[in-house]
Image (cartoon, coloured by chain):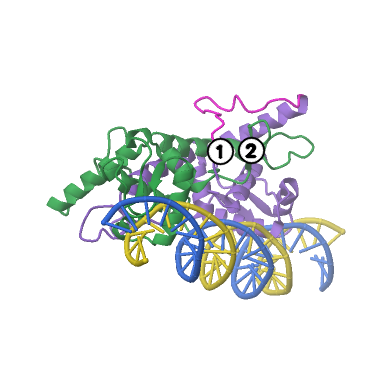
Chain colours: A purple, B green, C blue, D yellow
Amino acid sequence: MIFSSKAEYGVRLMVELGRQQPELPVSLKAIADAEGLPLAYLEQVVARLRKADLVMSARGAHGGYWLARDAAEITMYDVVGALEGTIAPMECFVHDQMERVVCSHQPQAGNGPCATKLLWTRVQGGIVRSLQTTTLAELVEFSRRSERESQSTAAQADGDATPGDDGATLEIVTA
Amino acid sequence: MIFSSKAEYGVRLMVELGRQQPELPVSLKAIADAEGLPLAYLEQVVARLRKADLVMSARGAHGGYWLARDAAEITMYDVVGALEGTIAPMECFVHDQMERVVCSHQPQAGNGPCATKLLWTRVQGGIVRSLQTTTLAELVEFSRRSERESQSTAAQADGDATPGDDGATLEIVTA
DNA sequence: AGCAACACCTAGTGCGGTGGTAGGATTTGA
DNA sequence: TCAAATCCTACCACCGCACTAGGTGTTGCT
């Protein structure tokens, strides 16, 4: 499993906020009920989003949360980054004081970086690109469309997600 | 952490095998010593690679492991898939009996797939593409080059990995 | 004033997976 | 016959994840 449930819950929470009118506070309880998620845990999740200035909040009665800026201006890189903390493909990925990604395997006797560095860098890049090019607005739109389609027919609802995206059935099954 | 140490050890093991002459058995102990990895644990790792027909083995004295086919014909998708088992960005990703990726969150009252599906599909795609387009031969070449460079100078050894690849310093730091 | 509905905070906890270790059995070459 | 190697299974300690528990602070409504 690549992302923890914090990431999933957080993304679903953000989508739910994006579906509401801007600036209108929505209570966590409403979201927890709608998504079927534990309220107390959602509090911890939304706290990270707030610290990252992705959502704003109002306390007291009729308080709640709303998006800090337009959904089109929020990328999944922002959201997942705030929720998951560091996203590194391996613990091998540390960075020294010069902000340079470097490998933690001591190249003893000075035989360069470990060979896996190239691979992890590429994987990292693939993930980050996916996250950076997906905005919250897209997910909200996707959510709205799915809802509409399933209301009319109970048929397929995926093949035509967004131009530039491949809805391929990608998987690695071995285990 | 996205990949477990099984993946890392396995990739390093494969690179080590790729650096040797083809068909020549190399003992696990030699690899464990060279890479500084626990031998007994490597046994479990290499067992997965063998079951996936990526390496072949010979028992008894002077036995060992070697690549089952040319390093250029082995992608990291093969290797990591064999080691890591299923690579799904979320447990949300299950597939029904029709081999279709579907979301496990029951769309109760039929309101379509959960909105995160689009995101996870893209991330999945980004990862898989990275893995599929990286061959073991590339890593072996990278390893050889790094070794050569660090022998002459103790300077930079990353910027020029492979054409078509961005060696960008990508990271998400929040936590 | 008082209550209810919220946000907000901290500490604890059960469980499963990760990352090994232990101890063997089997096969092969010298 | 021994040593070197693969091969196999069971076990275990730790740690992070996914929560739960139990509060405090703030606001609006009546």
Identify the residue at image location x=20%, y=58%. Answer: A110
Query: How many marks overall?
Result: 2
Q: How far apart are the two marked residues, 1 and 2, measured between alpha carbons?
A: 8 Å
Question: Which element type, helix, strand or loop, lies under badge 2?
Answer: loop
Read off the chain for label 1.
B
Image disc number at residue B115: 2
Would residue B84 be visible to someone looking at this image? yes
Residue C23 in the image: above or below residue A26: below
| Magenta segment boundaries in residue numbering | A153-172
**Residue A170 among those drawn in magenta:** yes
Q: Is residue A89 visible?
A: no
Residue on which the image places disc 1: B119
**Most common SS among magenta residues:** loop
State the residue at coordinates (68%, 49%): A25
Q: Position of residue A72 (x, y in %)?
A: 53, 36
Is A145 above or below relative to A33? above
- Of B36 and A57, which appears nearest the observer? B36
Q: Position of residue B123 (x, y in %)?
A: 51, 39
What's the residue type where badge 1 is placed?
A: Leu
Residue A116 location (% of width, % of height):
34, 48
Mark 1, secondary structure of its residue: helix
Q: Residue at x 36, y 36 (%)?
A: B69
